[in-house]
Image (spheres, rainbow, N blue to C red):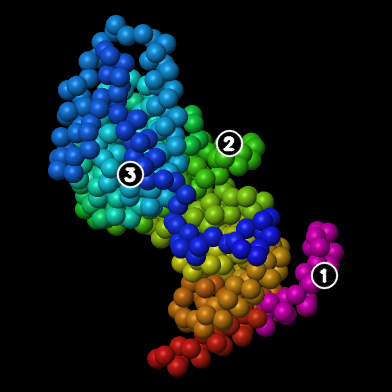
Amino acid sequence: MDCPSHHPPPPPDELFDIDTTVDPTYVISLIRKLLPVDSGSGQSTQVKHNPRMDPNNLVQGVVESMDIGDNHNESTSQEKDKAWEDHGCVLWDLAASTNHAELMVQNLILQVLHANLLVTTSSRIREICLGIIGNLACHEGLLKHIESTSGLVNILVGQLFLDDTQCLCEVCRILTTGLYGAESTLWAECLQSDDILRRVLWIAENTLNPHLIEKSVGLLLGILEGESEVGKLLIPPLMTLGLTSLLINLLSFEMSKLVKERIPERYSVLEMILRAIEALSASDSHSKDICSSKELFHLVCGLMKLQDKAEVATCCVTAGVLIANILSETFSFIPEVSQDFSFLEGLFSTLPFASDDLEARRALWSVVARLLARVNESEIDTFTLKQYILVLLSNSDIIEDDLLIMQLEDSFPSHSSRTIAIQKIESMLNNWNIRKGTLREENMNGDCSVNTADVKRLYDCCQRYISKSIEGSTFHG
């Protein structure tokens, strides 16, 4: 009572425990406003709250009460649709919150949305329905409610045959979420029809919208990365329908875009395509189908040779893993890049972007090891050896940093691709040191000379790593 009026007392402590400022009754009222409009009367179909009501009967009751006809006022219908869209967009946003999403599901939002999907002719209303379901599916525990709502999964799969880009994006998002869920087989069984799979491939191949390409390829990635049962059901028919050629064509298109101009919104599309191809290349049953493609190999090598990788760094790391998978399957491609110095440069320049990904670093080093294994440093001409030395020295900091990372991880496997590559690099540097005494500067065609101090520094670094590797092998042996 003694406080000045302009200094109000703090609110009670319990007010700070409120999880949301949105009144649950407001959310429930919005759900009721989404009930499909009876086009004959212009009124929303009313469903009284009944705790004992069977939710699975709600859709049938709503649809049966609809009087679909042409004798309605068009302006009134547009106003109703606009109001519906406004209410739906609010719920779409609220569905991103776990608390709100759970409240919405408890109050039959899925049955209401299902009913709308059955009767609406508005693409925007359909998109909002799918967007809300997509957000609900992202919450742990709520996906099973979507799966258990009678007929809903099949209705969702059927939306793939729409021609609306935004609706298709939301459908692909929902289906992908389902394929990564605990009941992934249920979703796979609903997708296994050839007509449905053909439609998925058609969407990915024919859309010009980058977001839809990303989402449709993401759906294919969900199949490729999914549970083994999902793969057994869906990958064989997809391969028969031309999955390999589709992915390569999409990669070719994105690479042509990347070479001409850098469009940031397409980077995620390129990454999704590369991830899908990499997943297929790692498949025990289908890797040969894609790893034997010379066009694919040239495309990913071209990506690896990009000078400025910062914007597409993740893509280049994925490409490095893919190249490693390809070369492990198709040895005949190795001679094509064995003396491609810009490609070797690209491999080293990608290593820093994979500093947090041990498997990716191993993959990149395995490619380096395969390339350098073809170099007979004692027989190749001095000019060619010098080209290798210049590439190695220009990336000496990267090599040293990567070896330092391995030292911090206390990992020195004696038979790893990295160790084999470092041993080869040491041998090449040693051979250069032997030759340099007989070289004359005028015979180097005006090229910049190799810095002796840089050679020694990298050579010593390689020796230290090899010594550590031998010690680790002896200790563990």
* Left or right for 433, reference 164: right
Closer to the N terminus: mark 1 or mark 3? 3
Question: Which residue is farthest top?
Answer: 71
* Left or right for 79, reference 375: left
Q: Position of residue 328 (x, y in %)?
A: 41, 60
Closer to the N terminus: mark 2 or mark 3? 3
Does the rendering let one see residue 426? yes
For residue 150: magenta?
no
List the residue tagged with mark 3: 104
* Range drawn in magenta: 438-460
Q: Nearer the viewer, mark 1 or mark 2?
A: 2
Disc 1 packing (10 Å; few <14; some 14–19; many ≥20): few
List the residue tagged with mark 1: 440
Disc 3 packing (10 Å; few <14; some 14–19; many ≥20): many
Question: Which residue is farthest front?
Answer: 1
Q: Which image quarter is the C terminus in?
A: bottom left
Q: Amino acid at mark 3?
A: Met
- Residue 405 falls in which quadrant of the image? bottom right
Does the rendering let one see residue 55? no
Q: Nearer the viewer, residue 434 or 414?
A: 414
Closer to the N terminus: mark 1 or mark 2? 2
For the residues labelled 2 and 3, the Cα–Cα distance comes to 43 Å
* Left or right for 20, reference 428: left
Mark 1–mark 2 CB contact (< 8 Å)? no
